[in-house]
Amino acid sequence: MSRRVVIVGAGPAGLAAAQAALAHGAHVTLLDEGERAGGQFWRHHDELTDRRMQHQWARFERLHAALERAGDHATVHRQASVWRIETEGGIRVHALVGPADAAARTGLTVEADALVIATGAHDRALPVPGWTLPGVVTAGAAQALAKRDGVTPGGRTVVAGAGPFLLPVAASIAIAGGEVAEVVEAVGLRRLVRGWGRSPWQLAGAAGKAGELAEYVGGLVRRRTPYRLGSAVTRIHGERAVEAVTVQRVDAHWRPIAGTERTVACDSVALGHGFTPRLEAAIQAGCRISSARFVEVDERQATSVAGIFAAGEVTGIAGADAALAEGEVAGFAAAGGTLDDARIAAVLRARRRLHAFADRLATHEVRRGWTAWLDDDTIICRCESVTRARIAEYADASSRGLRLATRAGLGACQGRTCGRTVEQLVAAPVDFDARPVLSSVRIGELAALAPNGGASTPSVGPEPSGSV
């Protein structure tokens, strides 16, 4: 009897896991929140997406074709919001299928012999005075607009933050017809050379990624777009919308250097300071989380919970190529494969090479000096309009006390946007990732579920409007 493998997430890691599990004879159920498979890396619209924004598109088409060829051996649920994972007496995944804002969604429960968590990460934007003005978006949102809808944030855009992700974001905006005023990178030249230049022979196995970065830099040169190193957007100006930003030199710890301020006129700002893994599902399933706040896995991509595997950015920010390799290993192992099988040997070698490349991304990790550019009235929690001063007032409180007193992390995003920022401001974990309910669920939808959360749940009508 074939093993039942459930995969949560249809980005590069999830799709690779599905293909590998199918190839090893498993029955695969793939759950993803999006309308289309591919995740952020392969986000697309069949008619609007300019293929120049896509990399390894042929790989996506092969992975997608594998699902279509699988027939009854693969079940794909798009727009599926997983809201609970249970592990007692077997693995059960509960989801609601349908548009999140629809009047009715269908309850679904899937039992599994193995679960692969490939929930990925979302981009992080550090707060800046003025970042709540219309025209400020995250770097990931700017890229999603360009890839999916063929539109830009508007007018002249400043792309600012840290990390190589800023480069494809700037390229996507330009391809979509926008103007990138500047790309502003907080890491200085000396740290870049030291971080990326060490042990260069280790990068030989990731020559494709290096070539991709070179292509992006070449695009900046051709378009004569300034690429400012060791600098940050420390203030965003405007009355009703973005009108300009203050760009300032920062030291090695990202503290602004007085006297280096300059003003750049722009109409929009795309902020991106790395990524935050989506840990909620793994935490609810009981998986061990490392001190670096990623899911701990072994060589098989197995977590600390029997039968549960994890792959992609949720185990460490390493890029799409590493996610593909990790997903393939996870899917193979989840289907019952062993690492001494010759069919997986090449993938294991590729994973090691790509992790060596990914180690360089630590060069761009957020430094603690960034808090020096905040004002007391800078909004930290956007959902509940909680300021830096309000957070500081309760910095010594418990995580629960902080949330109850300030409401930081209790808004619509449930701390996904502000969680890491609050942690740095109070210098203590705030546990925003631990949730009994993983995604927004209407009270009426919960009430309509069978006592055991069964898959026979009827669709829920539009009357109840509360959510948890």
Image (cartoon, grey):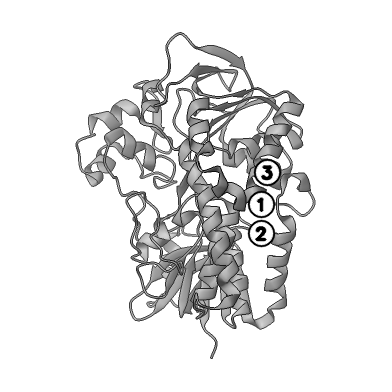
- Left or right relative to 251: residue 44: right
Q: Position of residue 158 (x, y in %)?
A: 61, 26
Mark nearest the camera among 1 and 2 is 1
Q: Is residue 414 above or below residue 295?
A: above
User: Is residue 9 at all visible to an observer of this figure?
Assistant: no
Q: Label 1, on which residue?
A: 43
Q: Nearer the viewer, residue 92 or 292?
A: 292
Distance from disc 1 to disc 2, alpha carbons, whole Å, reads: 8 Å
| Numbered disc 3: secondary structure | helix
- Compare marks 1 and 2 and give the one earlier in the sequence: 2
For the C terminus, the quadrant is bottom left
Quarter of the figure with residue 271: top right
Q: Are marks 1 and 2 in contact (CB under 8 Å)?
A: yes
Q: Label 2, on which residue?
A: 36
Residue lying furthest top: 259
Residue type pointed to by label 2: Arg
- Left or right relative to 60: residue 244: left
